[in-house]
Amino acid sequence: MTTATSPPESMEVALQRLLDVSPTQEFDIVLLDNVISTAYNPVSPQRMAANKALMTLQENPDLWTKADSILERAQNHQTRFFGLQILDDVIRTRWKILPTEQRDGIKNYVVGKVISMSSDEEAMKREKVFIQKLNLTLVQILKQEWPHNWSSFIPDLVGSSKTSEVLCENNMQILKLLSEEVFDFSRDQMVTEKVKKMKESLNGEFSSIYHLCEFILEHSQRPSLLKVTLQTLQRFLTWIPLGFIFQTNLIDALLNKFFPVPMFRNDTLECLTEIGNLTDLKPEYNPLFRKLFAGFLQRLGDLFPPETYLGQAYENGSEDDCIFIQRVALFLSGFFKAHLKILEVPDSQQLLMTGLFYLVRVSEVPDTEIFRICLESWHMLAQDLYESERESLGSTVLNIGSNGNASTGANRKLMYQQVLTGARQVMIANMAKPEEVLIVEDENGDIVRETTKDTDVIAQYKTMRDTLVFLTHLNCANTETIMLAKLTEQVDGTNWSWNNLNTLCWAIGSISGAMSEDEEKRFLVTVIKDLLGLCEQKKGKDNKAVIASNIMYVVGQYPRFLKAHWKFLKTVVNKLFEFMHEVHPGVQDMACDTFLKISTKCKRKFVTLQTDETVPFICELVDSLPSIISDLEPHQVQSFYESVGCMLNDKGAMVKIDRPALLAKLMDMPNRTWRKIMEEAIKNVETLVEPSTIKEIIKILKSNNRVCHSVGPLFTNQLETFFLDMLNVYKVYSERISTAVQQQGEIATQMSLVRTMRSAKKEVLRLLIVFIDKSGPPEAEARAVAQGFIPPVLDPILGDFQRNISGARDPEVLTLFTTVVEKLKNHVVDDVPRIMEAIFECTLQMITKNFEDFPEHRLRFYEFLRAINSRCFSALFNIPPAHQKLVIDAVVWAMKHTERNISDTGLDILHELLLNVGRTPHIAQGFYQQYLLALIQDVFAVLTDRLHKSGFKMHATLLRHMFHLVQMNQVTVPLFDLANAPAGQSNPVFLRDHISNLLVTSFPNVTKTQVASFVEGVFNLKMDLPTFKGHLRDFLIQLKEFSVEDNSGLFSEETEQETRKREEAVLAQRIAVPGLLKPSEIDNDL
C-alpha cells in the first residue's frame, strides 16, 4: 500500500541528498519515497521537477549500490519498481565491467529475493506484478551469466521446484521467460554465438526440465501451476528434441487429460498447435501425426460435431470460448499447411475431410482475424489442387504416366469436392471489399462514400480473389450455381441485405477471366439482368446506392463480355449515365470511374458503327453531353472528358468518324466559357484576376489536360484554338505575382489571390507538359511542335522563372523543359543554351544552399540535366565555359546528396556524360584534363563515406571506366603538372601514385601493401565489372570504418536483382492462371 507523503520542500535539495551514495552516508529511502510519490501525483505542482530529479538520479552510475536498500525498505510500490529499474540498467549496460564479487552480490540478492517472495502464497498474490518484474531482472542476469558462469542454474531451479508448489509455479514463469528471451527476442540483443550457446545449454538441460513438467502434469492438483506449466511447455515445444514429444506420453496427456477440462483447454490446444506445426521431419513420424490428428478430432467431436454452426456460439460465448475457436482455427490451418499430403492416404482420408469440414465451420465465424487464419489454408489448398490438376493435364497431353499420374489431379479434386463447395460458399459470403468500390456502410448503418482505404482489407481481398479464382477453375459450374442461388435470394427478398448483396457482387467481380467465354456469357447475362431488375424493384436512396455500386463494380470487371455484347454494353453505359445524376455520396464518383474503365477497355465499340445503330455511339454521346454531365462535380466532369478522349484516341482502320470534328464538339462547352472569359478580358484585363474567373480557368485547363492525356496527338487541333490566349493569361498572372512580391516581399506568395494565380500557372504548365509528352505523328510531329509551339513558350515562361524570387518559381517549369528535351530531342538543340541560361544558375543557387530546401526543384533539376546530357549532349558544350563547370559541379553535388534518388540520378548523369565525352573526340581531351582527376577523387569520397552504400554498383562502374581510360592511354593530355613532374612521367604511373597516396593518407589503418595490392587491381584491364566490384568491396570491408557496420548496402544490387527475379517469377505464375490478373492489369484496350 502506498503511504501518504508530503512533497519535499525543494527538489534541488532533495536531489543533492539522494545523489550522495557514498558508503558512509545512509541513503534516505523516505525522501526517495516522497520524490517518487510527487512524480506520480498528477495534481502536484512539483511533479515536473520530481520527474526531472528522477531522470538525473537514474544517470548516477553508483545508485545501483543502494538498490537492495530501496527494495527492502521502500514503502511506495513505485519506489520499489524504480529500484528494480536501476538494477536492470546496470545489468544490461555495465555488467561486464563490474568486479566479480559485485556481480555475485547482485545475483545472490535477486535469487534470494525471488525465492523468499515466491515461496509465500499470500505474497505471490499480493505482489504478483512486482514478482513478474523481479523474474525479468533475474532473466537479464541469466542472459549475461548463464551457462558459462552459472552452470548450476537449471539443476538448482528444478531441485527447488520440488520443495513447494508455490515456488514451482514461479520457477515455471522464469523458464517461460528464459525460453522467450533465448528463442524469440534474442536477435537484436545478443550476439549469435551467445544465443547459440544458450540454446545448446537449454537443449542439454531440457531432460531435467521436461521431467519436472511431466511430474507436475501427472501429480499436481494446483490449477494455476498446471496452467503455467502448459504455457511453459508450449514455449519449449518448437525446439526440443522430438523424442520428448513422440516417445513419451505427452500427446496422450494433452489430448486425454487436459483438453477435456475447460480450464486447461486453450493452453493445451496451444501446445498441440506447436506440435502440429512441426515440419521437415522424417517419414517415420507421419503415422504419429496421423494419430495426433485423429485424437484431436475425436476430442473435438466430444465438444461439437462438424456440422455445428459456430457463429452463434462465438457471439454468445465467453472470452475463453472465443479464444478456443480461434485456436482451433490455428491448429487446423497450421496442421493442413504442414501435413496435408500425409492425410491424403486412404486410411486417413475420412479424417482429413472431417477436419476440413470443421475448418469450413470455423471459417463461418463472424470474426475477421479467425477468417484470415482459415483463409491461408483455403488459399494453399485451392492453389495446390489447381496446380496438381494442371500438371496431370500436362502429362496427359504429353502422354506421360498415363496409368497413374494423369489421373492424380482429377482424383484429388474429386476427393475434396464436397469440402470445396463449402469453401466456395464461405469465400462468397465473406468476400472482402475491392479497392474500386467507393460506397460503404458506416458504423451507424448509413451508406456513405469511403474516405480512407483500409490496407488490411485490400490485402485480404487479393488473397480471397486468388483463392476464389482457383476454386472456380476447379469447378466452374459449382461456383456459378452457388452465386446464382445467392442472387435469386437477393432478388426474391428471402435473404436480402446490403452485406449479402455486396459480398456476392464482389465475389462475382473477382472471378473475371476464370470462366470460358461461353460460360461467362451465360452467367453474366443472368447476373446483369437480375441486378438491373433489382435496381428498379427496390425503393429508397440507400438501397439504390448499394445496388448501383454493385452493378458498376461487376460490369467494370468484365470488359471481355461487354466487348462481345454491344446491347449489354450500351444498356450498361446508359445506366451509368443515369447514376451520374444520383447525388448519393460516392455513386457519381463510381459511375465516372467505371465509365473511364469501360471506355479504356471497349473504346473501339463506341467509335465504330454497331448493329441496329444509325451512327457510332460517340456521336450520340457528344450530342447529349451537356445533359449527361449536368449534375457532376468539376473533378467528375474532368474524368468524363478523359473517358470520351479515350474513345477518340482509337484511330484504327475500322474507325470512320471525323475525329477532329468530334473533339471540337466534345470541347465546345469549355471552349465557349474560355472565349467568354477572353472577350471580357479584352474589355477589361482586371476581370482575369477575379478569384471566380481564375477558378473557372483552372477548371477549363484541367478538363483540357485530361482530354489531352487520353486523346493523344489529336489534341493539337484543340490546343491551337486557345494556345496564344493561354500564354497571355500565364503572362498576366506572372506579372501580377511579380508586382505583389515587389510591393509586399516574399510573404505575398502566401496570399490567397497569389496562390490561386499560381495554381492557374501550374495548370498551364501541366497542360503543356502532357501535350508535349503525348505529341507524335500524324497530328503533332516533333518538328512541327518544336517550330510551332516551343518559340512562343520560351519568353513568357523562361523569363518569368529567371526573374522571380525562389519561393515563386514553379518546379513544373523544370519538368516542362525536361519533357521538351526528352520528346523533341535534336529539334530543340538550338534552343537548349537559352533554356539553360534561364534555368541553370538560378535553380542551382536555390538547391545548393543545403540538402533540404526546395526538394521538388532539386529532383526536377537533375532530371532536366539528365535529359540534356542524354538527348542534346552537344548543346552542353555550346554554353559558356563557366556554365560548363557549373554543370559538372552540379553533378558532383547530386552524387554527394544524402537522398538516394538524387545521388543515384547524379551517378547516372556522370556515367552517361563520360560515355558521351568518350564518343566526342574534339572535346574529350580538354574535358579529361580539366575534370577527370577531380571526378575520380569525388567518386572515391562518396564510395568511402559510408552514407552512399546503395550506389556501390555505379561507383564501381565509374571508377573502372575512368581507371581503364587512363590505363588504355585514351587520355593523351597530362593529368599532372608538367613543371613539377619527373622526366618520362605517364598518366597511368602518375594516377597509381596519386591514388595510393590519397588512400594511405585518408585511411591510416590500411597498410601500404594492402593499398598497393588494391591499386594494382583497379588498373587491371582483365577485370570485368563483377570482378572489379568484388575487388572494391573487399578493400572497403578492410577499412576500419566499414568493418564494424552493416555492409548489406554494398550488396544491394544483388539483393535487388534477386527480388526482381522473384517478382518476375510470381508475375509469370499469375499470368499462367486465367483470372488471376485483373482486367485492368491486362493490356488489351480496344
Image (cartoon, rainbow, N blue to C red):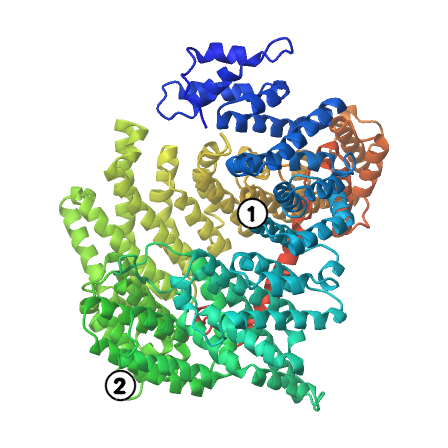
Mark 2 sits on what residue? 613
Image location (x, y in percent) of residue 76: 48, 25
Measure the alpha-carbon separation of dots 2 and 1: 54 Å
At mark 2, the secondary structure is: loop
> x, y percentage for residue 820?
44, 52
Residue 678 % position (x, y): 19, 51
Q: Residue at the spot x=69%, y=29% of the render?
A: 107
Amino acid type shown at disc 1 = Asn
Which of the two residues, 209 or 340, is positioned nearer the viewer here? 209
| Mark closest to the chain's N terminus, 2 or 1 | 2
The quarter of the image holding the C terminus is: bottom left
Mark 2: amino acid: Glu
Closer-to-camera residue (496/924) = 496
Does any portion of residue 346 appear in the rendered image?
yes
**Which of 420 and 800 lies nearest the eye of the viewer?**
420
Image quarter of residue 503: bottom left
**Residue 451 falls in which quadrant of the image?**
bottom left
Q: Any mark on residue 869, and which?
A: 1
Quarter of image, res 367: bottom left
Q: In percent of the image, x 45 and y 19: which residue is there?
A: 50
Position of 144 with respect to 617 (left or right) is: right
In this rendering, position of residue 1002 left or right of residue 1066? right
* 201, 803: nearer the viewer: 201
Circle 1 crowding by C-alpha within 10 Å: few under 14, some 14–19, many from 20 = some
In the displayed structure, 1063 sits above or below 1041; it is below
Above or below — where is 497 with respect to 158? below
Mark 2 or 1, closer to the camera: 2
Task: Give the residue at x 36% y 54%.
Answer: 452
Residue 921 visible in the picture: no
**Residue 934, above or below 414:** above
Q: Secondary structure at mark 1?
A: helix
